[in-house]
Amino acid sequence: MQTACIHCGAEHLLKDGQFGGHTKVQFKCSKCGKTTIVEIKRRVDSTVVMSPLPSFARANASSSNLNLPPPDPGIRLPEKAKVVLSILSGPSKGAKHTLNKPRVTLGRKGADIPLNDPEISRHHCLLEVRDTHINLKDLDSTNGTYYDEERVRAAMLQDGTEFRIGGSLIRVNFQPKTRRFYPCFDSQDWLCEILAPSPKLSGVR
């Protein structure tokens, strides 16, 4: 699992064998030399809930003001997959949102992904994509962020994870990008492989 030093924010990868069935583990940061104790809970959907909060989870936000730390240079969207948020319940049930940047806020009007849910805060939670997983942080919301009806402050999300904010149950999926073939009249080859049609091919069926 991936965690971070609570003193300097340096990230560390801890092997599952280091836990040995324990719910807490202590490690020494290779950058600042200080010690961090990590407490984890593992869920059946592979979500890892961490305490204390790692660096990605530290921010100061209220319902009207958003003050986030600078984005971590390690966050990025995956090259071969798209990250899709599916709303499974609540006022926006059935809606799907594909992330077009690796760092987004969920909330009401004014958030990167606004949801029509009166039970959520204006800036409710933060998602940061790190290629194969997502770091989630509750932005001090009024009604909280939940897994299995347990309120949490930060978690590491993987493909298929579901979480709830307000009355909205949200599922995270990493979906492989599909490739389509279109006639390519600017090439000697009849077909060219592209991810999306160019403007001059928009009328091709």
Image (cartoon, rainbow, N blue to C red):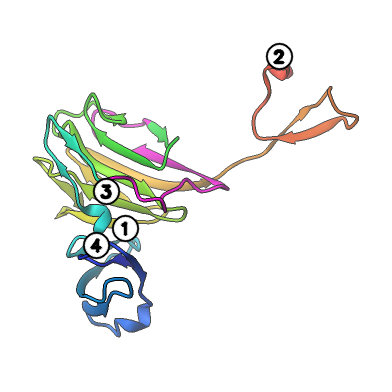
Residue drawn at x 20%, y 65% is: 7
Comparing labels 3 and 1, the label whose residue is closer to the camera: 1
Amino acid type at image mark 1: Met
Q: Main secondary structure of the magenta part?
A: loop
Pointers 3 and 2 in contact (C-beta within 8 Å): no
Q: CA distance from mark 3 to mark 1?
A: 11 Å
- Kindly give the residue lying farthest to the front in the view shown: 32
Pointers 3 and 1 in contact (C-beta within 8 Å): no
Q: Which residue is mark 3?
A: 163
User: Magenta span has 76?
Assistant: yes
Q: Which residue is mark 1?
A: 156
Disc 4 crowd, CA 10 A, few/some/many (<14, 14-19, 20+): many
Q: Which residue is mark 2?
A: 203
On the image, the x and y values in percent for residue 4 come to: 29, 65
Of residues 2 and 183, the one drawn nearer to the viewer in this rendering? 2
Amino acid type at image mark 2: Gly
Pointers 1 and 4 in contact (C-beta within 8 Å): no
Residue drawn at x 62%, y 40% is: 178
Q: Which residue is mark 4?
A: 49
On the image, the x and y values in percent for residue 111 come to: 26, 30
Q: CA distance from mark 3 to mark 4?
A: 12 Å
Asked whether residue 142 appears in the rendered view, the answer is yes
Amino acid type at image mark 4: Val
**From which residue to which does the magenta span run?**
70-95
User: Magenta span has 136?
Assistant: no
Vertical order, 110 against 140 (above or below): above
- Kind of element beneath mark 1: strand
Residue 101 falls left or right of residue 91: right
Amino acid type at image mark 3: Phe
Residue 51 falls left or right of residue 21: left
